[in-house]
Amino acid sequence: MHAETRSGLTALWVDIVVCDDSAVLLVRPTAPREGTAEWRLPGAAVQYGEAPDAAGRRVLHDHLGLDPEHIQLADVESTMREGVWTPTFHFRCDADRPAKVGPPIAEARFFQVEHLPPTANGTRERDIIFRVLSAPAPEL
């Protein structure tokens, strides 16, 4: 979903670092972009009128069958790619059960942080994972 701004198009995005002990969940979409590695963080565009945390919970529930009690906003970044400004909200949560994939995910698997596979955006996912995992825990 894109929205017009004075500077061009804007796309709000969420992704989630789902943790299980020292492993993180990566997904392989059913229709990967051509020319990219398939593994990536679970994520999606924020829908119009949707809060970023609600978008994160939607991705977890609809794409992975997960309903964690808490999700934490760990980091926000802003990128510009091909004329589209994309603020991305990076969330973190613990897995509340094994993931059960739904559309548009072909496979979901936990990888040890020190043994992550090649990912869709080169080292970007690794950087995000390390930033999110090193973010301070929220006070509940």
Image: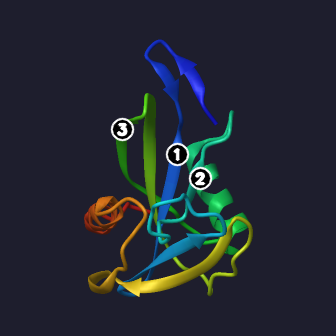
Disc sitting over residue 44 in the figure: 2
Q: Earlier in the sequence, mark 1 or mark 3?
A: 1
Question: Relative to 58, is 117 on the left or the right?
Answer: left
Q: Can you tell which quarter of the image residue 82 is in?
A: top left
For badge 3, the amino acid type reads: Ser
Give the Cα distance between marks 3 and 2.
15 Å
Q: Are marks 1 and 3 in contact (CB under 8 Å)?
A: no
Q: Nearer the viewer, residue 75 or 25?
A: 25
Q: Is residue 11 above or below residue 136?
A: above
Q: Amino acid at mark 2?
A: Ala
Callout 1: few (<14), some (14-19), or many (20+) C-alpha neighbours within 10 Å? many
Query: Is residue 49 toward the left or the right of residue 85 in the image?
Result: right
Residue at image coords 44%, 45%: 88
Q: Residues within 10 Å of mark 3 (few under 14, many from 20)?
A: few
> In the image, which disc is placed on residue 13?
1
Q: Residue 93, how many percent across, how many down?
A: 49, 69
Q: Which residue is mark 3?
A: 78
Residue type for callout 1:
Trp
Tag 2's secondary structure? strand
Q: For the view shown, which residue lies furthest in the top direction? A: 6
Could you say which is closer to the camera, residue 5 or residue 55?
5
Give the x, y percent position of residue 43. 55, 58
Separation of marks 1 and 3 at Cα, in angstroms: 10 Å
* Residue ID at (53%, 35%): 11
Image spot of residue 39 (x, y percent): 47, 72
Q: What secondary structure is marked by label 1?
A: strand
Between discs 3 and 2, the one toward the N terminus: 2
Q: Secondary structure at mark 3?
A: strand
Residues marked 2 and 1 touching at CB (< 8 Å): yes
* Relative depth, front residue between 88 and 32: 32
The image quarter containing residue 66 is: bottom right
